[in-house]
Image: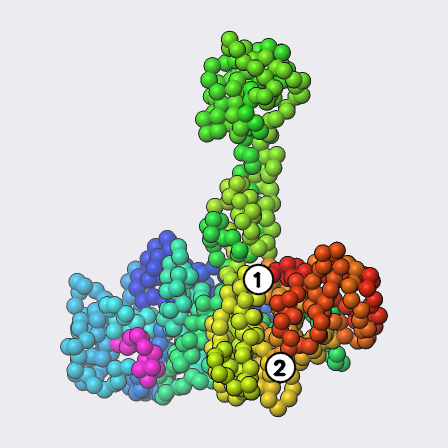
């Protein structure tokens, strides 16, 4: 269960009002509520921002929501500073001290003068420096940091020594200055605490036992994610608050925010930046702009032991939603991608009435077996601009717009022309060979539905109706791990007690064939620590993970054990042959499909379960293979209780033959087969000629 319903990130500013038009270096607010991203909010000055925050907090509290609000300025100063100013070691007393002394208006404030007055309280020059005004000198406030001689306080807080690239709180002006933000931000936080007394906690100074938590953040923690081009056409500050709010929300959804909050250190009132030490994990959550799955998404109904295939598939179908983000692509580059939004026609196809053939055009009401031709012609891209008088005809080429006065076309093979006269040699029907505007698709029509995986022909249709770009889901990144001490890469003279790892290239090939991006997470030996590390890497770089081997409940089944201890594991004992053990889990918010180690079982389970699940996770919706009944060319006695899938192919006479052995290790049968014969859960005696359901591999996207 998430700690918070709403996550808000505020990029603060210590400067003056910047006007009504959105700009960089202004105040930007990102909001993520219950997994839904809101557009970044622009604030022209601090007064607007404070009013907005107060109204939003009141609204969320009225709805019974819990909020986590992050501000990108320091909540405290280096050790000893708060007590030196206030006589108290409580850092929140310093908030009230600033609130009582800071004067703030949209176009001016007293931050520089106040910093100079504070400097005058200590021996030497400083600690504050950097005059924001280039024209006016402020007593006791040096313009350069090197001019300072005050050594009463440390230059940086402890957390700033760990946050690479962060700036000290003493600098009020110049590149990277954050000192002005702190002085102008703490009074706002103090007033919010006063306005919502008893309902606001400040991290890490107070227990988070109230509906509203104020935390210190630093958007540069996700600078790498933003630099990867996720804010094209967007102001970077706006992108950072949007993505950081999204990352914190996702961490919360998967239970990772709580340990990150627990890692915060008070450091004698200095404060702490949320996420320092967890930069890669937060950046990964920011890069992934999809939705992480809840830990209980694979839970089976109480009392379920052996799970029929249909029940397992229905449960998966109901629990899975897209986990990938959305981006805009030029339609010409979108083939193979899944539409995230419906596409409607920007214009009709054809856009205007035109000729379907090369021939001669005229008005049907003025048709005569012999008609004079007007000078000129109508050609594609070169329309005839004048009207064609009734009783006359015009030369027209395939695709040319119909001139005014033309509604019928005579094929050139059915006419003769001499001395400027057109002579018809066939009967004529009204409107023949003329295409109406929009007879294929009309402007505004729904052309392609969300969830469609775009094929080249779909791209052609979208282009024809004027769609220049489309919102598409980002590709699903499928991580593949093989486990087992017995596995080895192919090499000469390998000991017979080692098995070549066939599953990993097979599963990566399946992911690629289904339109996803395979990520090779390698082979992991049978140790818990090695598997844990590889799974953590996979959760950071992938949207879903496929493992093979170790999915049962034995002593050497480390996949199941790790997922049970540190993830959310459901052991699905699926009534399927080949297969049976199928470990479904969520690990660090990423769905994991633990497949059997035998290659045939891994292949069949991937086709039956992973393929439709991956389609749902990638935005393409649930897919079901299409099969058909054919006569059997084999005999088999099947027991009741499990659904069976036999490697099969069609013979020249349209019957289905099956591979000679049903052994799960017989990989040659996968290469031999062209599909599967599916035998239902009930007992059955099959003799040659009986109808069986045959599913070609093409129905599985292969």
Q: Quadrant of the N terminus?
A: bottom right
State left or right for residue 36 relative to residue 653: left
Whether residue 465 appears in this view of the structure is yes
State how many labels appear: 2
Question: On residue 514, which mark appears?
Answer: 1
Q: Position of residue 518 (x, y in %)?
A: 51, 68
Q: Residue at x 58, y 78 (%)?
A: 548
Which comes sooner in the sequence, label 2 or label 1? 1
Position of 340 relative to 365 (above/below)? below
Q: Position of residue 536 (x, y in %)?
A: 49, 79
SS at mark 2?
Answer: loop
Tell me the magenta residue range: 158-170
- Front residue (pair 302, 680): 680
Residue where numbered disc 2 is placed: 551
Q: Residue at x 53, y 41 (%)?
A: 465
Q: What crowding class fits label 1: few (fewer than 14 Cα within 10 Å), some (14-19), or many (20 or more)?
A: some
Q: Position of residue 376 (x, y in %)?
A: 46, 17
Is 417 magenta? The answer is no
- Write down the quadrant of residue 427 in the picture: top right
Q: Are marks 2 and 1 in contact (CB under 8 Å)?
A: no
Q: Quadrant of the C terminus?
A: bottom right
Q: Position of residue 430 (x, y in %)?
A: 66, 21
State left or right for residue 558 relative to residue 660: left
The single residue placed furthest to the left in the displayed view is: 147
């Amino acid at each position: 269960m998430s700690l918070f319903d709403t996550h808000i990130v505020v990029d603060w500013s210590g400067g003056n009002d910047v006007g009504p038009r959105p700009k960089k270096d202004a105040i930007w607010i990102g909001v993520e509520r219950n997994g839904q991203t809101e557009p970044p909010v622009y604030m022209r000055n601090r007064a607007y921002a404070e009013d907005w925050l107060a109204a939003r907090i009141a609204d969320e509290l009225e709805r019974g929501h819990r909020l986590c609000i992050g501000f990108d300025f320091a909540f405290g100063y280096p050790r000893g500073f708060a007590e030196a100013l206030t006589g108290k070691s409580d850092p929140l007393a310093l908030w009230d001290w600033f609130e009582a002394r800071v004067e703030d208006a949209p176009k001016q404030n007293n931050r520089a003068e106040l910093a100079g007055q504070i400097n005058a309280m200590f021996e030497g020059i400083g600690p504050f420096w950097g005059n924001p005004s280039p024209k006016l000198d402020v007593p006791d406030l040096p313009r350069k940091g090197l001019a300072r001689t005050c050594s009463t306080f440390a230059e940086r807080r402890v957390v700033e020594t760990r946050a690479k690239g962060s700036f000290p709180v003493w600098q009020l002006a110049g590149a990277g200055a954050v000192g002005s933000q702190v002085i102008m931000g703490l009074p706002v936080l103090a007033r919010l605490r006063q306005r919502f007394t008893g309902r606001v906690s400040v991290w890490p100074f107070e227990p988070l036992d109230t509906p509203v938590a104020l935390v210190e953040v630093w958007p540069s923690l996700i600078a790498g994610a933003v630099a990867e081009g996720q804010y094209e056409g967007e102001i970077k500050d706006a992108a950072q608050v949007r993505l950081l709010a999204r990352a914190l929300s996702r961490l919360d959804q998967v239970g990772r925010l709580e340990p990150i909050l627990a890692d915060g250190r008070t450091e004698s009132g200095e404060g702490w930046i949320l996420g320092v030490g967890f930069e890669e994990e937060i950046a990964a959550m920011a890069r992934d702009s999809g939705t992480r799955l809840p830990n209980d998404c694979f839970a089976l109904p109480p009392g379920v032991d052996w799970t029929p295939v249909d029940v397992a598939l229905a449960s998966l179908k109901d629990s899975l939603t897209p986990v990938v983000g959305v981006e805009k692509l030029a339609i010409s580059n979108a083939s193979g991608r899944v539409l995230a939004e419906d596409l409607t026609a920007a214009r009709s196809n054809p856009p205007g009435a035109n000729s379907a053939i090369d021939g001669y055009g005229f008005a049907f009401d003025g048709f005569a077996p012999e008609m004079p031709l007007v000078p000129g012609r109508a050609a594609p891209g070169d329309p005839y601009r004048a009207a064609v008088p009734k009783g006359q005809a015009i030369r027209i080429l395939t695709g040319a717009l119909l001139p005014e006065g033309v509604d019928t076309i005579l094929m050139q093979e059915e006419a003769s022309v001499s001395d400027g006269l057109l002579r018809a040699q066939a009967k004529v029907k009204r409107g023949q060979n003329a295409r109406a505007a929009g007879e294929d698709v009309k402007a505004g029509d729904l052309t392609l539905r969300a969830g469609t995986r775009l094929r080249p022909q779909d791209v052609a249709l979208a282009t024809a109706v004027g769609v220049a770009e489309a919102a598409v889901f980002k590709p699903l990144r499928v991580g593949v791990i093989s486990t087992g001490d017995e596995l080895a890469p192919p090499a000469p003279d390998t000991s017979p007690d080692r098995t070549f790892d066939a599953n990993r290239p097979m599963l990566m090939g399946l992911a690629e064939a289904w339109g996803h991006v395979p990520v090779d997470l390698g082979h992991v030996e049978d140790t818990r620590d090695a598997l844990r590390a590889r799974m953590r890497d996979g959760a950071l770089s992938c949207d879903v993970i496929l493992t093979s081997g170790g999915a049962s409940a034995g002593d050497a089944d480390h996949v199941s054990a790790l997922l049970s201890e540190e993830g959310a594991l459901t052991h699905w004992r699926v009534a399927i042959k080949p297969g049976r053990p199928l470990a479904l889990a969520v690990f660090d918010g990423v769905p994991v499909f633990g497949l059997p180690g035998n290659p045939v079982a891994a292949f069949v389970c991937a086709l039956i379960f992973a393929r439709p699940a991956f389609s749902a996770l990638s935005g393409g919706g649930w897919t079901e293979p299409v099969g058909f009944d054919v006569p059997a060319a084999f005999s088999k006695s099947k027991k009741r209780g499990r659904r069976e899938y036999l490697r099969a192919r069609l013979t020249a006479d349209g019957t289905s033959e099956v591979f000679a052995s049903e052994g799960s290790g017989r990989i040659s049968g996968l290469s031999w087969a062209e599909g599967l014969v599916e035998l239902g859960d009930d007992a059955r005696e099959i003799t040659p000629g009986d109808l069986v359901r045959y599913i070609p591999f093409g129905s599985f996207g292969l």
